[in-house]
Amino acid sequence: MDDLRIFERHAVDIPVFYEFVSFREDRLDELQHPNQTRAVNLSLAGVGVTGFPNLDPHNIQKLLKGEKKVRIGLQLYPDMPPVIVFARMVWNEASPNQKYPTSSGCAFIDINSESYYLIKEFLASLPSPQNA
């Protein structure tokens, strides 16, 4: 099957702070009680992470059904605060014999123009995916 992505994914290794919130949540000014994971790839459309530690099956179903969403803080640069966006979970994978997903993918939603610009500039500073 052909890859139908519009935006190129870039391999990254950056900290990601996250919390699961109601789909009605609209605050993007801060993360209130974040957990941490790592991004393994990033595009203008979403992020792939090494998983969400301790993500239980109940919350997986709520996230995949759109009853909850993920408030994500992308630590693009060590000397800047994280860029905070909302995302919806679109997939999870688990390694054999693992209780929790070991990788997850999220598509950005409710992204403001400043966050979009910062992610775009960060991605432009990376080697192109073909040369990475």
Image (cartoon, rainbow, N blue to C red):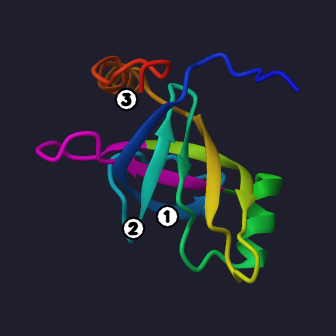
Q: Closer to the camera, 89 or 33?
A: 89
Q: Position of residue 93 (x, y in %)?
A: 73, 61
Answer whether residue 76 is magenta in the image. yes
Question: Tag 3's secondary structure?
Answer: helix
Q: Hey, what amino acid is under mark 2?
A: Pro
Q: Which residue sits at x=55%, y=34%? A: 110
Q: Which residue sits at x=51%, y=29%? A: 43
Residue 67 visible to an observer of this rendering:
no
Residue 34, numbered label: 2
Q: Are the two marked residues, 1 and 2, in contact with CB atoms closer than 8 angstroms? A: yes
Q: Hey, what amino acid is under mark 1?
A: Glu
Residue 70, numbered label: none
Residue 19, numbered label: 1
Give the left or right position of residue 93, taking residue 128 as reference: right
Which is nearer the N-term, disc 3 or disc 2?
A: 2
When the figure is inspected, residue 46 is found, relative to residue 120, above or below; the finding is below
Residue at the outermost left position = 79
Give the left or right position of residue 118, taking residue 45 as reference: left
Q: Quadrant of residue 21?
A: bottom right
Q: Closer to the camera, 53 or 109?
A: 53
Q: Closer to the camera, 8 or 80?
A: 8
Q: Position of residue 34 (x, y in %)?
A: 39, 67
**Quadrant that contains the C terminus:** top left
Which is nearer the N-term, disc 1 or disc 2?
A: 1
Which is nearer the N-term, disc 3 or disc 1?
A: 1
Task: Report the span colored magenta.
Answer: 69-84
State the CA–CA distance, disc 1 to disc 2. Answer: 5 Å
Question: Tag 2's secondary structure?
Answer: loop
State the CA–CA distance, disc 3 to disc 2. Answer: 19 Å
